[in-house]
Image (spheres, rainbow, N blue to C red):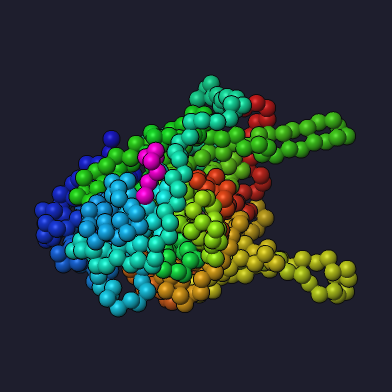
Amino acid sequence: MTAHPLDPLTAEEIAAAAAAIKSHGGLDDSAWIETISLNEPSKAALAAGTAERQAYICSYEPSSNCTFNGIVRLADGSLEDWGHVPGVQARIVPDEFAAVDELIRAHPEFQAACRARGIEDMSNMLVESWGAGHFGIEDEEGRRLAYCHCWVGNEAGDNPYARPIANLHPVVDLATYELIRIEDFGAVPLPPDPGPMNRTEHLRDDVKPLDIIQPEGPSFEVDGFKVRWQNWHVRIGYDLREALVLHEIGYEHGGEIRPIIHRASMAEMVVPYGDPRGGNFRRNAFDTGEYGLGQAVDSLALGCDCLGHIHYFDVSSHDWQGAPRLIKNAVCMHEEDYGILWKFQNGRAGTSRVVRSRRLVISSLCTIGNYIYGFYWYFYQDGTIGVEVKATGIPFPSAIAPGESSPYGAVVGPGIESHVHQHVFSFRFDMAVDGPNNAVREVNFEPAPVSEHNPHAAAINIVETKLKTETSAQRTLDMSRARYWKIVNPEKHNAYGKNTAYKLSPGNNSLPILPADSPTGKRGAFMYKHFWATQFAATEKYPAGMYPNQDPGSDGLAEWTKADRSLEGEDVVVWYTLNFHHLPRPEDYPVQPVVYADFHWMPDGFFDENPAMDVPPGKR
Ligand code: NI
């Protein structure tokens, strides 16, 4: 089968791209591969049918401490724009993580530091190499660094994070594999063994089966990575950094597929932690740009608790030698019953109509160290698109001495504290509402003064503002005005003379607590606005820049938007920041029940009436 231009790279394509770099990339034997991912074709090439298969590739050469990137044309293995990218550091890849873990556990200096804490068994230990961030510390400039956090696993062997070793941080040069130093801020007693994570005793016995039966099969149709369901059309994609990507989201209406979003993804995230003590100020995980969520996608062959008829999509990742690695069942798709879609009852006539809602769920889970993020995309029968993050796993555990209280967190278990933090996600939407040229509107609702026309102060003024350029389109939520944003097609009109539109309907959100001029605030400048809009540029993919690892904040949304490009009748990209604030509770430990954070894209004059009036009632 010939791949569609937007299909994820196949294992063969990944291997071919790796071979091309090894044979004529000009790098020495120390080099390894950070990323091989689809280089997506332009909209023009897609429309013209001239898109060719290309791989984006990024490589790191330890001997020179240099990062290289470019494009491999898969038809003939030739390289384009291949070269050194000065002053940047590639992501920290999983194989590097594993290599550092092994190196440090075998290091005599580290073993001595552990023995001083009464820890003898190095085999049941985990050393994680986190990004060092950028704090202007003198001997760190220009070096490729990892700042490590350490744990002793439980005796049952099913929880490597069971017993944190507080205040012990090996600092490693990742180019030379040298232990530069061990930062030791004082021993804290190792917490007691919490026992097995996978409990088998005292399980509740009153959970009766709940089966979802679809005797005629699912209502979706799948062709490769293309999906059609209840008028919705969407393509499943995958990126090594962003994980699940959706392409060409459109709704079939009046005999045509009306485009809405050309490309949608979670493009960056950061988790700033609020404990300034010892080495803990370093914990600010940019999980997408520093580590790569696509490489952390769970194979749901190991467990998926979705009910009903499930369709899985496999994707291919790779190791640092560029060898393809199949992620079986990386993306899960199924239908869910979602309660009432709409109801009308006429008591006088004694008639009623109630229609049940169903949604298509497309999701992926990413395990990134101790934590798990689920990214869920929902398509509803009324034209609404839901975007939801589900967070679970183990809230980052540190050790605390018995009887002490945690000034920057909470005691969540025996000898365990977990620090206050925020999970900040940046979702990127390359919009295409009814076509390529869109514009941005902000809607606010405001009280009006008492006047002759408003004698009882009942008026709510609807204030719609054009956000015409990038500097005007950097906005935060305002609950007092019930603020939201709309992407309109200025060339298209509905039956009522209004531009067809989709509105971004926010849900729970928060703002960063750390100051914008702090080291991490500068690196994550995207955090400080909930809504950004930019004019499309192919190179502007990740809101904290292409290379956030150890970057001071030199690239990304705040930099690009200084150009203040027009957004009126242009190819508009929307970036929505979703921030959920988290002070861990004892109930979040030893595993956190799923926390949800979401928002929606809703049609707003895109249709002339409720597009779900044709959904049949009854048990369907
Ligand atoms: Ni959390």
On whether residue 239 falls in the magenta region, the answer is no
**Number of marks in the image?**
0
The residue drawn where x is 70% and y is 67% is 480
Q: Seen in the image, is 184 located left or right of residue 407?
A: left
Residue 411 seen by the camera: yes
Q: Dividing the picture into quarters, in which one does residue 278 lie?
A: bottom left
Q: Quadrant of the C terminus?
A: top right
Q: Which residues are magenta?
A: 152-158
Left of 589 or right of it: where is 548? left
The answer, for residue 47, to whether it is visible in the render is no
The one of 499 and 260 positioned closer to us in this rendering: 260
Residue at screen point 47% across, 64% down: 272
The picture places residue 45, in percent across and down from the top left corner, at 32, 54
Q: Position of residue 530 (x, y in %)?
A: 54, 65
Image: 300 above or below 79: above
Q: Position of residue 83 (x, y in %)?
A: 19, 65
Q: What residue sits 42% from the left and 65% below the top?
A: 280
Residue 612 location (% of width, % of height)? 64, 40
Is 301 situated above or below 483?
above
Please give left or right for residue 144 compared with residue 230 in the image.
Answer: left
Q: Main secondary structure of the magenta part?
A: loop
Magenta-drawn stretch contains 153: yes
**Residue 294 falls left or right of residue 481:** left
Which quadrant holds the N terminus?
Answer: top left
Residue drawn 27% across and 76% down? 139
Residue at the outermost top position:
215
